[in-house]
Image (cartoon, grey):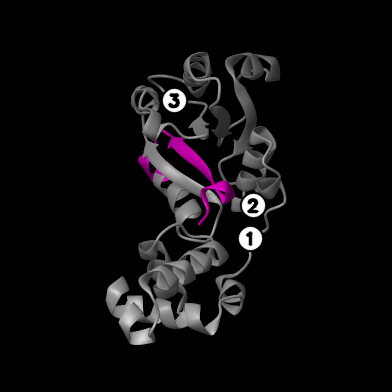
Amino acid sequence: MNVNNVATVGIVDNDPLVAKALEDMFTNRPTPLQVMWSVCDGREALSLCSCDAMRPEVIFTDLQMPTMSGKDLANRVTTHWANVFMIGITAFNLTYTRQELIEAGIKAVLRKEASVQEYVHTVGVVTGKDFLRTWEERSLAASRMLLTDTEITVLREYLKGRTTSSVARLLHMSEGTVKSHMNNAYSKMGVHSRIEAIKVCIQEGLL
């Protein structure tokens, strides 16, 4: 998928099951959110953010965490990296005022059980990315209908374990053309790699 059509995110929740559930919600279906990492501690999130290559555009943080609260984490992140947007997530009633959260750098707050569409739209609002604000989840079956016959054929051959060069020889096209078909398929399916595309196809029985 074109990097201009995704937003990178990090997830912080002291409950590893919740962190994993959120990560799976964004990665096990076609969404425009690319999870860079998922951690259970604010200090680990700060350590990751200190590396340019690991710093996401948006961080979802649990607001009630024992070691470092989401509010404190947001304050530290936005102090050091003003271009990172913080979104609070909670399963409980807020213990902070709206003004306290704003001053800490929290741009929005979501219930943890919010739909994937609500998560995506909120990222769109805080980042100003219009394509996220208007994104609608569509079924993978609908995504498949948008794939061309050639894109489906290429996906099938990759599913068989063929390499790009062997797919190119089999279909009498250049490796560059094969990659172009795959990139088009990634964009339509809302995935970011061949592994994700194959995983989605297996899960949904698209091929």
Is residue 92 rendered to the left or right of residue 128?
left
**Residue that numbered label 2 is attached to:** 117
Q: In this view, does 33 lie to the left or right of 67?
A: right
Magenta residue check for 172: no
Mark 1 secondary-structure assignment: loop
Horizontal side, residue 154 vs residue 63: left or right:
left
Q: Name the residue under label 3.
A: 65
Quadrant location, the C terminus? bottom left
The part of the image, by quadrant, that contains residue 147 is bottom right
Residue type, label 2 = Gln
Foreground label between 3 and 2: 2
Which residue sits at x=52%, y=34%? Answer: 57
* Front-lying residue, 137 or 192: 192
SS at circle 2: helix
Q: How far apart are marks 3 and 2 (CA)?
A: 25 Å
Tell me the crowding category of disc 2: few under 14, some 14 to 19, or many 20 or more residues within 10 angstroms, Cα based: some
Judging depth in this view, the residue of 202 and 161 nearest the camera is 161
Q: Which residue is drawn at 45% across and 79% down?
A: 205
The answer to whether residue 101 of the structure is visible from this angle is yes
Nearer-the-camera pick, 1 or 118? 1
Provide the secondary structure element on which disc 3 rests. Answer: loop
Q: Which residue is drawn at 48% across and 60% down?
A: 191
Q: Give the range drawn in magenta.
A: 1-19
Question: Sequence-wise, which precedes: disc 1 or disc 3?
Answer: 3
